[in-house]
Image (cartoon, rainbow, N blue to C red):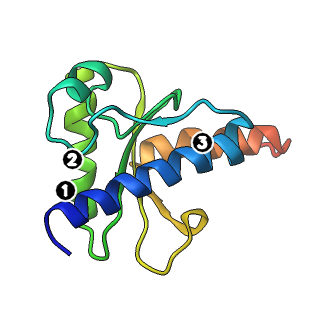
Amino acid sequence: MKGRGCKEKGARFERELAEWFNQQVYGRECAFRAPLSGGGGGVNERMTGGADLVGTPLIHVEAKRVERLNFLEAMAQAERSLARSGGPEVPVVINRRNRMTTDDSLVVMRLKHWRILYLALLQLEGIHHV
């Protein structure tokens, strides 16, 4: 699929992902597809720094709905757009392939950021670590 079909598929995934966050994380409507996300700049760059979703505190989401993803380049894209916004969020790339549910999408992030999540989980579970 090329051109407009790919853009529409990506936009659908961004809406699905926002809905997933709203249902599975927030329990109410908080996350939305960013205005003009995937449009190559413009309003989205000024409003959100280029994140594909808005209303996701602490994370800068780069959504990718492709079969073959260059994860390093996708992360670099997320980091560049986050740098333009100057925000404190953690960049994450979320990828879904065909025949994969949104719930089974992959989340890619830097190990230094994942460490923060893991330490918080250990603390939440009452597991003491060195």
Q: Where is residue 35 in the image (x, y as percent from the top left)?
A: 33, 31
Callout 2 touching callout 3 (CB < 8 Å): no
Q: Earlier in the sequence, mark 3 or mark 1?
A: 1
- Tell me which amino acid carries mark 3: Leu
Q: In this view, does 9 lie above or below 80?
A: below
Callout 2 touching callout 1 (CB < 8 Å): yes
Q: How far apart are marks 2 and 3 (CA)?
A: 21 Å
Q: Mark 3 points at which residue?
A: 117
- Tell me which amino acid carries mark 2: Ala
Asked if residue 130 shows in the view, the reply is: no
Q: Which of marks 2 and 3 is nearer the N terminus?
A: 2
Q: Which label number is shown at residue 73? A: 1
Q: Mark 2 points at which residue?
A: 76
Quick check: 49 left or right of 25? left
Q: Where is residue 8 in the image (x, y as percent from the top left)?
A: 30, 58
Question: Could you tell me which quadrant the N terminus lies in?
Answer: bottom left
Q: Residue 85 occupies which quadrant of the picture?
A: top left
The mark closer to the camera, 2 or 3, is 2
Around disc 2, counting alpha carbons within 10 Å, would you say few (fewer than 14), some (14 to 19), or many (20 or more)?
A: some
- Quick one: which residue is furthest to the bottom in this view? 99
Question: Could you tell me which quadrant the C terminus lies in?
Answer: top right
Viewer-side residue, 122 vs 66: 66
Quick check: 85 left or right of 29? left
Q: Distance between the residues labelled 3 and 1?
A: 23 Å
Q: Position of residue 72 (x, y in %)?
A: 23, 58
Viewer-side residue, 67 vs 19: 19
Q: In this view, does 85 lie above or below 67?
A: above
